[in-house]
Amino acid sequence: MSQQSKADDEKLEAIVKAIQDLQFGEVHITIQDGVIVQINRLEKQRFPQKK
């Protein structure tokens, strides 16, 4: 397996990990010059309101 392929697999794995078990939130993937350079995960917790 080439170095590029390993790097791509690691990035895809990081994306999958970021969206697993995420019920409410966002995943931002930053790309520069066609290359993924950063992955941010913002998770929100929502609580039911009693009326």
Image (cartoon, rainbow, N blue to C red):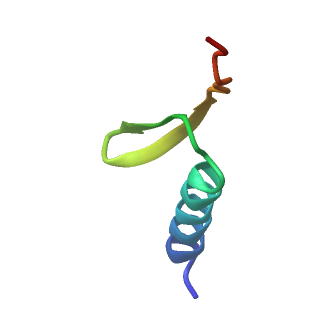
Q: Which of 20 and 31 is in front in this view?
A: 20
Residue 9 position, x and y percent, is 56, 71
State which quarter of the image contains the N terminus: bottom right
Q: In which quarter of the image is residue 30?
A: top left
Residue 29 position, x and y percent, is 45, 39
State which quarter of the image contains the C terminus: top right
> Would you say 8 lies left or right of 6 here?
left
| Residue 20 drawn above or below residue 28 | below
Please tell me which residue is depicted at 64% across the width and 16% down the height of the picture.
Answer: 49
Which residue lies most toward the top here? 51
> Would you say 43 lies left or right of 36 here?
right
Please tell me which residue is depicted at 60% across the width and 35% down the height of the picture.
Answer: 41
> Would you say 17 lies left or right of 2 here?
right
Q: Nearer the viewer, residue 38 or 32?
A: 38
Q: In which quarter of the image is residue 15?
A: bottom right
| Residue 18 drawn above or below residue 45 | below
Which residue lies most toward the left here? 34
Which residue lies most toward the bottom here? 1
| Residue 4 drawn above or below residue 20 | below
Residue 47 position, x and y percent, is 68, 23
Please tell me which residue is depicted at 57% across the width and 51% down the height of the picture.
Answer: 19
Residue 35 position, x and y percent, is 40, 48
Please tell me which residue is depicted at 51% across the width and 70% down the height of the picture.
Answer: 4
Q: How many marks on residues? A: 0
